[in-house]
Amino acid sequence: MNKPLRVAFFPDSFLEINGAAMTSQKLVGYAKKNGYPFLCIHAGRKTEIIQDETVTYLSLKRSPVAIKMDEDLAYDPLFQRHSTRVIRELVKFRPDVLHITGLNDVSITGAYLGWKMQIPVIGSWHTNIHEFAAHRLAKMFSFLPASYVSKITNFAEKKILDGSVLYYKIPKVVLAPNQELIDLLARGTKRKAFLMTRGVDTETFSPAKRTVSDGVFRFGFVGRLRAEKNVRRLVDLEKKLLEAGQVNFKFLIVGEGDERGFLEKNMRFVEVTGFLDGEQLAEAYANMDVFVFPSETETFGNVVQEANASGVPAIVTNQGGPKFIVRHNETGFIAENFDEFVKYSLELINDSEKLAKMKKLARKFAQSRSWDMVFKAVYQAYAETYAIALAEKDIK
């Protein structure tokens, strides 16, 4: 097609505070900046339509029976009551491609309407809900013997993953933020799978935003303070640092969640700021010396790139998306286990020359991660989806 593809987008998270929502907002912003026709259908505080240049927003209010899934994310089992309203907007907009994301009330509605109206569907994987569920179940059943908890969580994780892969058989093309997920989806769905990474704003997040110079070494964390983020490892890390004789350090933890009280109660040298955004968040990142991210459930890890852009090297686990961001021993470390988290933390506290070098390399790497390049590839995937549907004669 010579004209820009018309895209209807059904993000599972849009107004919330998380990496998936931020990525969705950036995608809509890219479409607006380039003058591409774009319809974004999302959950909001009220039902309304807003037109912003070439972008149309259809905000749909969840019902009172919506089930809370996170701090500001919910699932409404009655969400499909909006289907008639959505169909009306889809008929008016005439999309070439319909983009769904995860297993959520909004995207499920999109998947159903894509099938019903024979609109070619592309799907992007943003969240490892199977791993999130397993971690929360482990916390919920922590009073049981470990062997029982392991059986429960392993069973739940497998079944939810199987269901997620089945859901992603609906699209003709799938997108995922790391190679492990691309391989998993391509194998499980038999669909074409492409990489959809994440960019980072290196003007907002910059070492120039640093405001502290007190000589205190700051370990940082940014994210939801929930079980799936494995944040209790920060408590364990502080204990090990103290045992090693370190005292001139502090943990700067940015985020909210039900683990906040545990962290504040069990850590000595800690500042928990709660949720921050904008310039306050940029300043917090820049005031860190090392970013410590013990989560094992990340599909990508936007916060790791934001830390890098702020000139902060990261220590991450060897599971999930962050290990594809960090260049081991250059922009940070990939820890194989908790002992290595401790080892690398001590190494950077005690080697200022190496830390300074890593800070520069982290910033340089982040400057190569452009959002425009990410979304240019997404639009190429839209074109692929449309071409496949045209070849299969699925388009009305």
Image (spheres, rainbow, N blue to C red):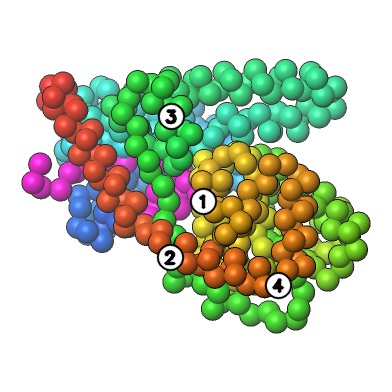
Residue 22 in the image: above or below residue 191: below
- Farthest residue in the left direction? 2
Q: Where is residue 229 in the image (x, y as percent from the top left)?
A: 66, 44
* 4 vs 1, front mark: 4
Q: Is residue 135 visible?
A: yes
Name the residue rendered at 37%, 59% in the picture: 370
Cα distance, mark 4 to mark 1?
A: 23 Å
Cα distance, mark 3 to mark 1?
A: 17 Å
Residue 384 in the image: above or below residue 6: above
* SS assignment at label 2: loop
Q: Which of marks 3 and 2 is nearer the N terminus?
A: 3
Q: Which amino acid does label 4 sit on?
A: Ser
Disc 3 designates what residue? 183
Q: Which of marks 3 and 1 is nearer the N terminus?
A: 3
Cα distance, mark 4 to mark 3?
A: 39 Å
Q: What residue type is labelled 3?
A: Asp
Name the residue rendered at 72%, 18% in the picture: 151
Seen from the viewer's position, the closer of residues 215 and 102 is 215
Q: Position of residue 2 (x, y in %)?
A: 8, 46
Q: What residue type is labelled 1?
A: Ile
Please state if 151 lies on the left or on the right of 86 as rendered: right
Disc 4 designates what residue? 352
Write the start and end of the magenta stretch as one range: 1-26
Q: Position of residue 348 (x, y in %)?
A: 72, 64
